[in-house]
């Protein structure tokens, strides 16, 4: 049976679970010589079944007198004799009783102990597995083609499986540390019933290989031959005890399996999962306890075929999904003062991107054999192995967490297409965090999508040099196609530190909110986007948080308690025309006006994106095509002018003339040109009536950057005319 536990626990205990499963299968032949692993079917009779050669658990067809009983008892007697002949296996059987039918029998008072060779378990220590039960009933027991078949297998009371691991004292492991596994793992199955059972008599191995990956591959190949029509276990109890003092106890009920065939489970479910873990750090104060309960867990489409391919076995190209679907309902947990719950968890399509054998397995085998393994090479292989896997979909709904006075909740978390190449989308909805009534964060929606991960070689290349080149840095950058954040509200009393208290002696918390932030990117060249768009809508900041004392004082005097900003911009490079467009860089301040800028540059080479180090040199060949600056509705400027006029006791008209004259001085000799005069005059008028000001640059022909630079040095007064500069104090 498969032990059903949440994804996090599966990942944590993967090594122990896989090792225990492999060892249990190994009882039926992993320690036999190679000639004992070959078998062929023989004709069956009602009295006996036989296999050729030295195969397990069958009487030879040599005419020997059958022992008292029936065909089933003879098979079980020979099986016990064969197990006892294996040096690493010890078997005690109280009795084997014939059933009412010829192919039915009962094993009573059985204890089987299997001492796993150290070289199989990474050479790290001694592992012992024990199986015991009071009574196991077989019905329809028979043999065919190296397989044992039974219509029914039933354990009415308890079947116990115990695993004990003791690492070799003083053994150094260059890449695998097994010391943390020292201890025992015990499982008790109560009321076990299996229908339509088929199991292989032995592990089919290549030669005498006892490497970890070879042993695992043999175990999975044998497991692929197992067939189960249906299986049910009333209750499962698991207990782990580690030498460091850590313990784990797990129970679950109503385990039900439907159709296990060719290495694939159609469906497996359990109810009432409960787990308690105690981490003992040698002191009472540091001992921590974690409790987890789950109402129901369901697996569908659990397939070992992709794992066999990754281990170097046969590849099945149309089977690249390891787990088609997992559902977890009503998870609750507690750890000290932290409690929480999750309403539903859904995982779909955990699979592999390719079925090429994992390079890390050869390194683990070498390490197990005592050969030196380069740690950097091992790290690269481990990273590549992780990148092989892909998760199609994850949804987590209804998260609630309480830690003392701190609370948090999340309505939904979703991921799509997370794997070694990138991430389709990650989103959060309804996130709430609170540490006190005056300190909380609300995020309505957060999403990041179309994320591309850089190649592993690019990341490792950064560690190989002290000062990486720009090309190396760009190669190691991830790419992002979309970022969306909406309905954000942050309130904190810490922002108000140093602010004057109210008459009650308390400081009012301050707030920042955001309606929408959206970033879109595409057309990547060397991981640099050639298309980008940014939208910021409804960024609201309370005035005291602006930081500039003079600005804060002015806004408060104008009775403006908060500032709302809106911004939008898009940038696009056309690969055919080589034009670079800056479209409508817009900044809007509620009640304070709007400024927008558009710009077009021509002949912008691809080198700007391929090698930013050369961007300045590459831009020398670019041309200026057009630009437009528009400022409108800037009524905050009018308020500012009026405020300054009152402070200095200077008429408003005179003050605007002073500001206009200041601009004229900044323009230098350009102020004497037609454009300069128009600009100064329009600026002065705009200060008095800040309705609209437009500056437009539209040369008759594109202007090369080198030409502009030359004019700046030799004849700056000619620049406005060459650029076709014009100014409009009102709309066009």
Image (tube, grey):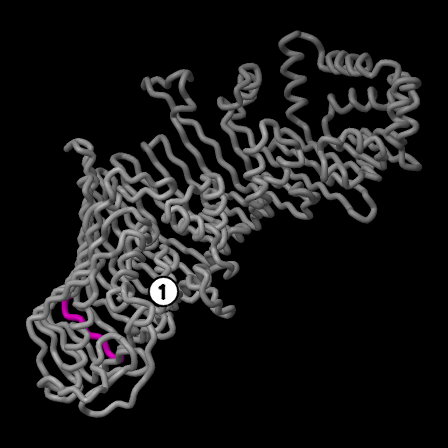
In the image: residue 612, left or right of residue 395: right
In the rendered image, which residue does mark 1 sit on? 218
Q: Which residues are magenta?
A: 190-196
**In the image, what residue occupies the spot 13% across and 74% down?**
136
**In the image, what residue occupies the spot 89% across and 19% down?**
716
Q: Is residue 194 magenta?
A: yes
Decide which of 365, 421 is in the foreground and name it.
365
Q: Position of residue 20 (x, y in %)?
A: 26, 58
Location of residue 76 by image quarter = bottom left
Decide which of 69, 308 is in the foreground and name it.
69
In the image: residue 166, left or right of residue 214: left
The quadrant of the picture occupied by the C terminus is top right
Q: Position of residue 563 (x, y in %)?
A: 55, 29
Q: Position of residue 668 (x, y in %)?
A: 85, 14
Residue 156 drawn above or below residue 495: below
The quadrant of the picture occupied by the N terminus is bottom left
Residue 732 drawn above or below residue 318: above
**Label 1 element class:** helix
């Amino acid at each position: 049976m498969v032990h059903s536990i949440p994804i996090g626990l599966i990942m944590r205990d993967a090594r122990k679970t896989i090792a225990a499963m492999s060892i249990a299968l190994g009882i039926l032949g992993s320690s036999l010589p190679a000639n004992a692993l070959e078998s062929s079917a023989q004709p069956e009779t009602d009295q006996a079944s036989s296999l050729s050669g030295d195969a397990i658990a069958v009487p030879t067809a040599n005419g020997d007198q059958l022992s008292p009983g029936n065909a089933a008892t003879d098979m079980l007697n020979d099986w016990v004799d064969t197990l006892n002949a294996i040096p690493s296996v010890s078997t005690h059987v109280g009795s084997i009783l014939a059933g009412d039918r010829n192919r039915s029998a009962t094993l009573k008072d059985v204890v089987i102990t299997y001492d796993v060779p150290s070289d199989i378990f990474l050479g790290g220590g001694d592992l012992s597995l024990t199986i015991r039960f009071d009574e196991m009933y077989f019905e329809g027991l028979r043999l065919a083609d190296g397989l044992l078949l039974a219509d029914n297998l039933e354990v009415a009371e308890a079947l116990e499986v115990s695993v004990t691991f003791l690492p070799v004292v003083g053994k150094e492991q260059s890449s695998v540390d097994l010391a943390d596994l020292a201890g025992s793992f015990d499982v008790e199955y109560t009321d076990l019933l299996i229908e339509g059972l088929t199991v292989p008599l032995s592990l089919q191995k290549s030669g005498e290989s006892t490497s970890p990956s070879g042993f695992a591959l043999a175990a999975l190949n044998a497991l692929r031959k197992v067939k189960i029509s249906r299986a049910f276990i009333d209750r499962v109890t698991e207990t782990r005890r580690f030498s460091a003092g850590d313990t784990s106890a797990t129970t679950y009920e109503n385990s039900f399996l439907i159709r296990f065939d060719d290495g694939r489970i159609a469906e497996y479910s359990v109810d009432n999962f409960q787990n308690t873990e105690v981490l003992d750090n040698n002191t009472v104060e540091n001992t921590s306890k974690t409790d987890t309960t789950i109402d129901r867990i369901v697996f569908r489409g659990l397939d070992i075929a992709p794992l066999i391919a990754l281990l170097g076995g046969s590849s099945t190209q149309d089977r690249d999904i390891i787990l088609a679907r997992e559902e977890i309902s009503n998870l609750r947990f507690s750890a000290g003062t932290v409690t929480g719950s999750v309403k539903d968890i859904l995982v779909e399509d955990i699979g592999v991107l390719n079925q090429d054998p994992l390079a890390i397995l050869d390194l683990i085998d070498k390490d197990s054999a005592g050969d030196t393994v380069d740690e950097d090479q091992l790290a690269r292989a481990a990273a590549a192995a992780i990148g092989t896997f892909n998760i199609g979909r994850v949804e987590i709904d209804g998260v609630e967490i309480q830690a003392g006075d701190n609370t948090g909740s999340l309505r939904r978390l979703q991921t799509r297409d997370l794997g070694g190449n990138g991430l389709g989308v990650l989103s959060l909805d309804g996130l709430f965090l609170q540490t006190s009534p005056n300190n909380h964060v609300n995020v309505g929606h957060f999403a990041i999508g179309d994320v591309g991960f850089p190649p592993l070689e690019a990341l490792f290349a950064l560690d190989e040099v002290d000062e990486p080149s720009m090309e190396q840095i760009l190669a190691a950058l991830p790419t992002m196609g979309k970022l969306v954040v909406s309905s954000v509200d942050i309130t904190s009393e810490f922002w108000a530190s140093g602010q004057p208290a109210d008459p009650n002696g308390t400081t009012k918390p301050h707030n920042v909110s955001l309606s929408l932030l959206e970033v879109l990117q595409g057309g990547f060249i060397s991981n640099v986007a050639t298309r980008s768009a940014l939208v910021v809508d409804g960024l609201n900041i309370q005035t005291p948080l602006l930081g500039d004392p003079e600005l804060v004082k002015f806004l408060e005097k104008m009775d403006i308690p908060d500032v709302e900003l809106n911004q939008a911009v898009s940038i696009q490079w056309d690969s055919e025309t080589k034009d670079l467009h800056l479209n409508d860089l817009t900044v809007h301040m509620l009640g304070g006006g709007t400024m927008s800028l558009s710009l077009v540059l021509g002949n912008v080479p691809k080198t700007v994106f391929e090698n930013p180090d050369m961007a300045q040199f590459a831009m020398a060949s670019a041309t200026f095509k057009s630009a437009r600056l528009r400022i409108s509705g800037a009524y905050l400027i009018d308020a500012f002018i009026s405020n300054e006029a009152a402070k200095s006791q200077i008429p408003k008209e005179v003050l605007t003339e002073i500001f206009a004259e200041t601009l004229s001085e900044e323009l230098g000799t350009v102020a004497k040109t037609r454009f300069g005069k128009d600009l100064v005059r329009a600026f002065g008028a705009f200060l008095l009536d800040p309705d609209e000001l437009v500056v437009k640059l539209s040369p008759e022909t594109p202007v090369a950057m080198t030409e502009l630079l030359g004019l700046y040095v030799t004849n700056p007064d000619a620049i406005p005319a060459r650029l076709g500069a014009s100014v409009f104090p009102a709309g066009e």
